[in-house]
Image (tube, coloured by chain):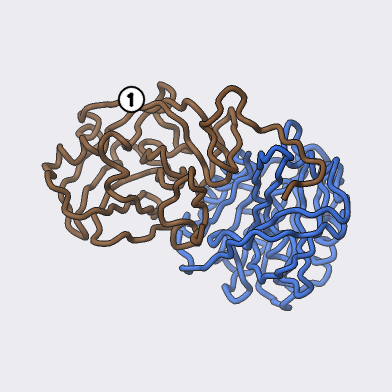
């Protein structure tokens, strides 16, 4: 349905093909979160890889930072309809986390990311591996700020950005695809921006 | 971050018709939508609006619902005009009564409150961040709840206070709803109001006006506003687990 009198000005100028349907580009970096921003010091920080309830390996801040660092630059898409192009991140690939923990054959095909504030979000393992996702420690050349999820956040740029859990403190293999915080509150179980999977039945 | 789940959200787009437009402040207007498929929303939820240009380009934005539950199928959104915006200037300058706008909802299952959730309730809003909190205050009034509630509302000036007269009226009912205004570029007009930014001291002082510590805290506004108000609430001793935030951005 054409809206009377609407011409629109959010089209991607010269960046055709990089903005998913219904998204508009922003230059700033909007902040969204469900509660107060947690303040986590490096001493308090840790990251745990689990199979169900059982820890596989736990890293301190220094141990985690000693893993191989990888840079990723790409576009991110928030379900609230903004997209930001060419964002530059640095962190630890999920591949490198699994390798360091000695996980060869993945025990299950699903993962749930957990955060310091109680947030969680589910992502299939295949969307986290083969260089597709990382635990980001730096944004735009600087340590990740608390309002953007610092000290560390998940980065899964090919899915809507609520999947990129802020203030991450662990990844957990689950037997089935278990909905996380927003997935239990009406948002899509997978969240592909190119298929506009915003809400449960999209 | 604990609340009830799961909630099923309504996903279908419907074509709503603008029935009324009411200017509220210099920068905010209320738009009333008649829904062909009326729904029951919870206070604090939002809808998505979708605008389509003749060439097929679409813009989607989320707006909080200002109205309490309505059985008439009419929904109120209060839209602030953002300079350089794409959708809000369109609403302020182009949209007229009788226009058809695509809308889906109700959406969002976290930043919501029902009278049955109980209280006391602390609402902290900045500017048009009042909108979802207004839906909560209206819902509370609609169901004749006496849950002790305090709204701490920040605005630039007295005339920038969205729904000012309605809020003053709610307080005059003396059924447990307290309004505290803080005007960042104006003098306080009423006893107990402020003219400064919200900090831990302000939050601590207004908490004393509730009969007991709040069970639920909702904070809504711009990102800097929510960040500083949430820090103020934490510094005033409120636990992070009872604080829910919503930030207005792009």
- Seen from the viewer's position, the closer of residues A58 and A190 is A190
Looking at the picture, how far across and down is residue B197, in whole percent?
68, 41
> Quick one: quadrant of the N terminus of chain B?
bottom left
Task: Pick the residue in front: B159 or A4.
Answer: A4
Q: Nearer the viewer, residue B20 or A146?
A: B20
Most extreme residue toward the front is B55
- The answer to whether residue B187 is visible is no
Q: Residue at x 70, y 59 (%)?
A: B65
Horizontally, is B193 left or right of B8 in the view? right
Q: Chain of mark 1?
A: A
What colour has chain A? Answer: brown
The C terminus of chain B appears in which quarter of the rendering?
Answer: top right
Image-quadrant location for residue B105: bottom right
Circle 1 residue: A71
- Residue A110 picture quarter: bottom left
Residue A85 left/right relative to B98: left
User: Above or below — where is B114 with respect to A38?
Assistant: below
Task: Supply the letter of whichever chain is blue.
Answer: B
Task: Give the SS element for disc 1.
Answer: strand
Point 36% across, 41% down: residue: A154
Residue A126 percent location from the top left of the image = 28, 45
Q: What residue sits 40% from the left and 21% below the top?
A: A141
Within 10 Å of the Cα at label 1, are there few (<14), some (14-19), or many (20+) other Cα atoms? some
Q: Position of residue A92 (x, y in %)?
A: 27, 32
User: Residue A140's spot in the image, x, y percent?
Assistant: 44, 23
Query: Is B97 left, or right, of A40 in this rendering?
Result: right
B102, above or below A153, in the image: below
Q: How many marks?
A: 1
């Amino acid at each position: 349905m054409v809206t009377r009198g609407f011409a629109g000005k959010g089209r991607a100028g010269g960046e055709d093909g990089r903005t998913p349907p219904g998204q508009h580009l922003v230059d700033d970096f909007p902040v969204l979160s469900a509660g107060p921003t947690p303040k986590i010091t490096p001493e308090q920080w840790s990251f745990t890889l689990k199979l169900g309830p059982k820890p596989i390996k736990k890293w301190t801040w220094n141990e985690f930072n000693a893993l191989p660092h990888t840079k990723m630059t790409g576009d991110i898409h928030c379900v609230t309809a903004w997209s930001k192009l060419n964002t530059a991140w640095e962190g630890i690939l999920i591949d490198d986390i699994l390798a360091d923990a000695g996980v060869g054959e993945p025990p299950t095909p699903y993962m749930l990311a957990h955060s310091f504030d109680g947030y969680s979000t589910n992502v299939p393992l295949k969307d986290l591996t083969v260089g597709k996702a990382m635990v980001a420690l730096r944004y735009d050349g600087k340590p990740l700020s608390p309002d953007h999820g610092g000290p560390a956040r998940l980065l899964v740029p090919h899915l809507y950005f609520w999947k990129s859990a802020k203030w991450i403190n662990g990844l957990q293999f689950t037997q089935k695809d278990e909905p996380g915080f927003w997935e239990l509150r009406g948002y899509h179980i997978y969240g592909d921006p190119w298929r506009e999977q915003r809400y449960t039945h999209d | 971050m604990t609340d009830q789940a799961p909630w099923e959200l309504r996903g279908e787009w419907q074509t709503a018709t603008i029935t009324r437009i009411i200017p509220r402040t210099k920068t905010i207007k209320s738009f009333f939508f008649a829904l062909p498929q009326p729904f029951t929303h919870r206070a604090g939820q939002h809808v998505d609006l979708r605008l389509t240009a003749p060439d097929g380009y679409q813009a989607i934005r989320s707006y909080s619902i200002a109205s309490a539950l309505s059985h008439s199928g009419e929904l109120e959104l209060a839209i602030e005009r953002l300079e350089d915006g794409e959708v809000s200037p369109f609403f302020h300058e182009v949209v007229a009564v009788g226009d058809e706008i695509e809308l889906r909802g109700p959406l969002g299952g976290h930043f919501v409150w029902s009278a049955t959730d109980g209280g006391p309730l602390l609402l902290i809003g900045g500017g048009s961040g009042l909108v979802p909190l207004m839906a909560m205050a209206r819902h509370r009034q609609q169901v004749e709840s006496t849950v002790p509630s305090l709204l701490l509302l920040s605005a630039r000036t007295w005339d920038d206070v969205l729904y000012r007269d309605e809020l003053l009226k709610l307080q005059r009912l003396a059924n447990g709803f307290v309004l505290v205004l803080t005007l960042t570029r104006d003098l306080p007009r009423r006893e107990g109001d402020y003219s400064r930014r919200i900090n831990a001291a302000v939050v601590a002082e207004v908490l004393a006006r509730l009969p007991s510590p709040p069970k639920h805290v909702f904070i809504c506004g711009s990102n800097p506003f929510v960040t500083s108000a949430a820090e103020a609430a934490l510094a005033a001793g409120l636990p992070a687990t009872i604080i829910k935030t919503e930030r207005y951005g792009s």
